[in-house]
Image (cartoon, rainbow, N blue to C red):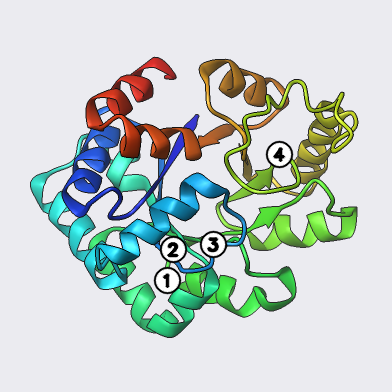
Amino acid sequence: MLGIYITAGYPDIETSKKALRSLDDNNIDLIELGVPFSDPLADGPVIQKASHQALINGVNLDKIFSMVSELQNEGTKNPGKGINNLILFSYFNPLFVYGFDKLIAKCKETGIRGALIPDLPIEEAQELCQKFKEADLDLILLIAITSNKERIKKISELSNPWIYLVSRTGVTGSTEDIKNLESSNLEKNLDEKLKNIIKEIKSNTNKKVALGFGIDSKEKIDHALSLGADMAIIGSKTLKLLGDSGLEEFSKFITSVQ
C-alpha cells in the first residue's frame, strides 16, 4: 500500500486541487493532506517551505474543507482510496484553535476520514481518540524508533485504524536511504530495529503499520514493505516535485512508484 502527503494550498490552491485529483485518478491508497502551520517541528525544509507558502496563500482549515468538498462533488474514482481515503495531517494547535467538535462535524460533512497529529503525546491522546472513534473517524498516532515496549503497546491500542511508524530520528525529507542508515552513527542496525518494532506492534494489535520519513523511491517503498510494514508514505519528494517541477512531473512520479 502507498500513501502520499501533500500540503494543502501548495504551491497554490488550484495546483493543490489538481494534485489531489491526480492522486485519486491513480487510486492512491491513502492521501495525507497537510494543514499548513507556522512551526512544523517534525518537518524538514521542503515541507516547511510548503507550509509557509500555503499560509501566504491564505490556506486555512475552512478553505481545506471547501476544497475537499468541491472535489468530492466532482466525483471520485474509488470508494476506498484516493480522495475517499483522505486524512488531515496537522499539528495540534490549528485543530485545537478550530475546535474539535467543529472539526469532527466538518470531516463528516466533507468525507475526510480523520486526522494524523504528529505532536499529540500519548499521555493526552485518550479522550480525543475516543471522541474521533465515536464519530467513526480515524485518529492516527505516531510511534518512534526510540519508543519502549510499554509506549508502543499504548499507542498501538489507541491509534485507529492504523499506526504511523517513523523510520528514523530527525525530520522529514532525508536523502539517506533507509537501507543504508544502519551503517551511520545516527542509527545502528536500523532495519533490525524497524522489523522488531513492527513485530511488537503486531503482537499487540491487528492494525496496519505505515512507515514514513525518508522514503522517496520505488526501491525504498519495496524495502519498507519488506520490513513488515503494510504501507509506505512519501511526502517531501512528491511535494518538492509539485513545487519545483509542476503537476506533470508530480503525476509521472506517482505513476512510476506504484
What residue sits right under mark 2 in the picture?
137
What residue sits right under mark 1 in the picture?
135
User: In the visual, does 32 lie left or right of 116?
Assistant: left
Cα distance in 3D space between marks 4 and 1: 30 Å
Q: Earlier in the sequence, mark 3 or mark 4?
A: 3
* Residue type pointed to by label 1: Ala
Residue 164 position in % (x across, y down): 62, 48
Q: Which mark is residue 167?
A: 4
Cα distance in 3D space between marks 1 and 3: 27 Å
Residue 180 position in % (x across, y down): 77, 21
**Is residue 87 shown to the viewer in this render?**
no
Q: Residue at x 23, y 56 (%)?
A: 68
Vertical position of residue 227 compared to residue 117: above or below: above
Q: Does dot 4 land on a helix, a strand or a loop?
A: loop
* Residue type pointed to by label 2: Leu
Q: Which mark is residue 190?
A: none
* Residue type pointed to by label 3: Pro
Cα distance in 3D space between marks 3 and 4: 18 Å
Q: Nearer the viewer, mark 2 or mark 4?
A: 4
Cα distance in 3D space between marks 3 and 2: 24 Å
Q: Residues within 10 Å of mark 1 (few under 14, many from 20)?
A: some
Q: Residue at x 41, y 58 (%)?
A: 51
Q: Nearer the viewer, residue 120 or 85?
A: 120
Q: Does dot 1 land on a helix, a strand or a loop?
A: loop
What residue sits right under mark 3 in the picture?
40
